[in-house]
Image (cartoon, rainbow, N blue to C red):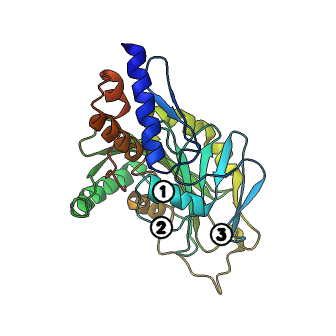
Amino acid sequence: MKKPILFLLTLLALSFLHVQGEEDSSAVVSDDSSVIQLNDSLSLQMLNYDTTGSVDLGSGLATFAIPVGFKYLNPAQSSYVLADLWGNPPSETNGMIFPADASPIYPATWAIEILYEEDGHVKDDDAKDIDYDDLLEEMQEQVKEINPQRKEAGYSTVELLGWASPPYYDEHTKKLHWAKRLQFENDSTETLNYNIRVLGRKGVLVLNAIGGMDQLYEIKTNIDAILASVNFTEGNRYEDFDESTDKLAAYGVGGLIAGGILAKTGLFAKIGLIFAKFAKVFIIGGIAAGGAIIRLFSGRKKDEGQA
């Protein structure tokens, strides 16, 4: 019975994608039927990635030199992925970075969203004196205080479990990164939230990645390449700050870390939204594939939002 079930699953998946109006539909079911891999082109519009060269960020504000093994998605298409595919509230973005072999509709995908926040020049005088254990406790309290508002807005509550990677600030490059361990309400698995900040003349570039804890090593392994690839242009660099004309931010490095706990990282709804839709198709069709489907659709629900 295994082959007929696999055949029916494939037909249902293809039928669903056709109904959604997606182009170049294709689905591949693995031999053990535990994972359905979907092609990048299975989206409501074709996604065109830049895979080489340097990308302009923010109309000359900064550049992203695409490192080997990665690809870049422009702001318009990134907004589509974030809002339409992954269920995040619509917002402006400067694009997304994906591993070269990643797809926005594959459950194991991790990606990095790029934003720019112009809150002023961030002084880094406090960086050497920060006690990150104390800061973590403050952030955990902050999360507890905001959870009732999350609940009221229709999002799952979230718990900040601790550092997945403690904060590290490079005073020479003016680049900061750290990672948090999060757990959403009614979810037995932990979520990884990796944060990168590049300090500039009038604000900071915000690069946030989110994925499973099992992806921590892969993300950490690639952090140096990502950090090296993102830089402000001349005139917008940290050292270009003019105290006679430019505004100072109301916070330092510690504030960047603590304040980021509630920021949208772009992957909060993540891939669970797509596969939740798939699950409905299987239920309607009356098809049961046992543990394979349970494993496939046991990801986060689409309302598991921002942290």
Could you tell me which secondary element the residue under label 1 belongs to? helix
Whether residue 168 is visible here, answered yes or no, is no
Q: Which residue is mark 1?
A: 82
Q: Which mark is residue 72?
A: none
Whole-percent x and y of residue 286?
A: 27, 31
Q: Amino acid at mark 2?
A: Ser
Using a 10 Å C-alpha cutoff, classify the residue at mark 1 as few (fewer than 14 neighbours), some (14 to 19) or many (20 or more): many
**Closer to us: 44 or 181:** 44
Residue at image coords 28%, 40%: 187
Q: Which residue is mark 2?
A: 91
Whole-percent x and y of residue 231?
A: 70, 60
Q: How many marks?
A: 3
Whole-percent x and y of residue 69?
A: 69, 39
Task: Look at the image and tell me in which quarter the C terminus lies.
Answer: bottom left
Whole-percent x and y of residue 108?
A: 48, 36
Q: Amino acid at mark 1?
A: Leu
Q: Quadrant of residue 54?
A: bottom right
Whether residue 203 is visible here, answered yes or no, is yes
Q: Amino acid at mark 3?
A: Gly
CA separation in Å, label 1 and label 3: 18 Å
Q: Which residue is mark 3?
A: 58
CA separation in Å, label 2 and label 1: 9 Å
Query: Would residue 119 appear left or right of 188 to someone viewing this image?
Result: right
Q: Residue furthest top?
A: 1
Q: Nearer the viewer, mark 2 or mark 3?
A: 2
Task: Look at the image and tell me in which quarter the N terminus lies.
Answer: top left
* Marks 2,1: beta carbons within 8 A: yes
Could you tell me which secondary element the residue under label 2 belongs to? loop
